[in-house]
Image (tube, helix red, strand yellow):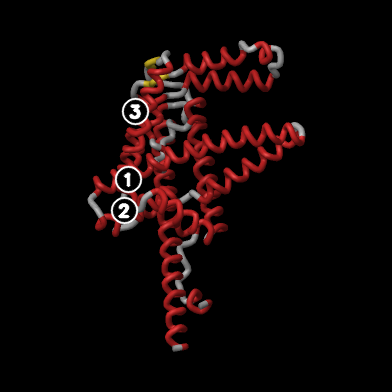
């Protein structure tokens, strides 16, 4: 069986995946249209500002007697940063549907706080009104991202075009991505409750210092949990499977290619964050921000394409390996008979 595994071709590597991702965008530059339109809307369209709610939250926090007497300079700086975030954040950034991988420079929180707004703002004062906008904008953003991801997946894997028409493909991605987002939110809520419960118990039994150990364990669990789910969206988009199967496939692909997956994620993080710092440096002018939006879209789409290509190659390699092993076992059984 080991010789059977060795006869398989080596799957697509990390660098080759990135190269193929950029090659794909060079051949199909129209895949940049939707990300560019989203950023154009966030740049030149009206802004939905929730600054009053941020300011109200800061004031409510600092008005507590025990907080007012124990504010450190670092805490004051953090609160001021939080207030500035409220002044610059555009609620329409939810239209980017970032969980789908759609790149949007102006939807990033760090970019929103680092660049001065240029469009007029519609200020929202009521929490219920903000909540209504969030409920409407998140599904709309997921739909925009799902349409874009469907086109990207069909360009990456031609067989996806044969499986179903584009509108059904986008609808499938939208439904399952939304369900996946809800499950992640539910899991985060449950983990938060469990953390608070165990933290209280440990403090009672072992003292306050035990809380930090639990915090470190929770942090590393979250990191590894996130790495294991790296290809859920890729599986939904490329394979047309539901959330449960996508999670199973992602965990298996990551588990069988852990070092390569971590390498891919680190390179994507390095390229994305590194170039974002450059776009921030030149984004003070109209020309500089235009270059930044175009550059971010180009690199971001290529990196998402590379992720799809990497997942597809590694999943297919795993399936071929399973088939070869099963065939070898079947031949061994026939020989014994």
Residue occupied by mark 3: 136
Q: Does dot 3 land on a helix, a strand or a loop? A: helix
Query: Gap in Å between the C-alphas at discs 2 and 1?
Result: 9 Å
| Percent coordinates x, y for residue 258 in the rendering | 55, 57
Q: Is residue 281 above or below residue 308?
A: above
Residue 218 falls in which quadrant of the image? Answer: top right
| Percent coordinates x, y for residue 88 in the rendering | 47, 21
Left or right: 176 with respect to 253? Answer: left
Residue drawn at x 53%, y 41% as measured from the top left? 274
Query: Gap in Å between the C-alphas at discs 3 and 1?
Result: 25 Å
Q: Is residue 145 above or below residue 58?
A: below
Q: Are marks 2 and 1 in contact (CB under 8 Å)?
A: yes
Q: Which mark is residue 155?
A: 2
Left or right: 267 with respect to 148? Answer: right
Residue drawn at x 60%, y 45% as measured from the top left? 221
Q: Does dot 1 land on a helix, a strand or a loop? A: helix
Q: Crowdedness of circle 1 by 10 Å Cα count: few (<14), some, many (20+)?
A: many
Mark earlier in primary sequence (2, 1)? 1
Residue drawn at x 30%, y 42% as measured from the top left? 147
Left or right: 187 with respect to 236? Answer: right
Q: Is residue 246 above or below residue 298?
A: below
Mark earlier in primary sequence (3, 1)? 1
Residue occupied by mark 1: 31
Query: Gap in Å between the C-alphas at discs 2 and 3?
Result: 29 Å
Residue 210 makes an appearance in the image = yes
Mark earlier in primary sequence (2, 3)? 3
* Frontmost residue, 96 versus 199: 199
Residue drawn at x 47%, y 88% as measured from the top left? 336
Q: Crowdedness of circle 2 by 10 Å Cα count: few (<14), some, many (20+)?
A: some
């Amino acid at each position: 069986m080991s010789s059977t595994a060795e006869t398989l071709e080596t799957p697509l590597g990390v660098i080759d995946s990135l190269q193929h991702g950029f090659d794909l965008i060079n051949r199909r530059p129209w895949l940049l249209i939707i990300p560019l339109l989203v950023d154009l809307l966030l740049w030149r369209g009206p802004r939905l500002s929730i600054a009053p709610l941020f300011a109200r939250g800061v004031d409510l926090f600092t008005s507590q007697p025990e907080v007012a007497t124990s504010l450190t300079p670092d805490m004051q700086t953090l609160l001021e940063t939080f207030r500035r975030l409220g002044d610059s954040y555009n609620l329409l950034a939810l239209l980017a549907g970032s969980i789908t991988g759609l790149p949007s420079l102006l939807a990033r929180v760090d970019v929103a706080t680092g660049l001065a707004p240029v469009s007029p703002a519609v200020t929202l004062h009521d929490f219920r009104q903000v909540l209504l906008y969030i409920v409407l904008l998140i599904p709309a953003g997921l739909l925009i991202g799902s349409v874009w991801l469907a086109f990207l997946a069909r360009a990456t894997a031609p067989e996806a075009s044969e499986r179903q028409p584009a509108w059904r493909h986008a609808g499938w991605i939208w439904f399952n991505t939304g369900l996946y987002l809800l499950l992640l939110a539910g899991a985060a809520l449950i983990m938060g409750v469990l953390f608070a419960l165990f933290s209280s118990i440990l403090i009672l039994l072992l003292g306050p210092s035990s809380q930090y150990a639990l915090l470190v364990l929770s942090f590393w669990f979250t990191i590894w949990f996130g790495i294991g789910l790296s290809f859920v969206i890729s599986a939904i988009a490329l394979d047309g499977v539901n959330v449960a199967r996508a999670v199973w496939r992602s965990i298996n692909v990551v588990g069988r290619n852990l070092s390569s997956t971590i390498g891919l994620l680190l390179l994507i993080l390095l390229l994305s964050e590194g170039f974002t710092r450059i776009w921030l440096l030149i984004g003070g002018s109209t020309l500089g921000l235009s270059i930044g939006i175009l550059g971010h879209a180009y690199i971001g789409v290529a990196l998402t394409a590379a992720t799809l290509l990497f997942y597809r190659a590694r999943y297919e390699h795993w399936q071929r390996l399973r088939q070869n092993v099963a065939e070898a076992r079947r031949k061994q059984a026939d020989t014994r008979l």
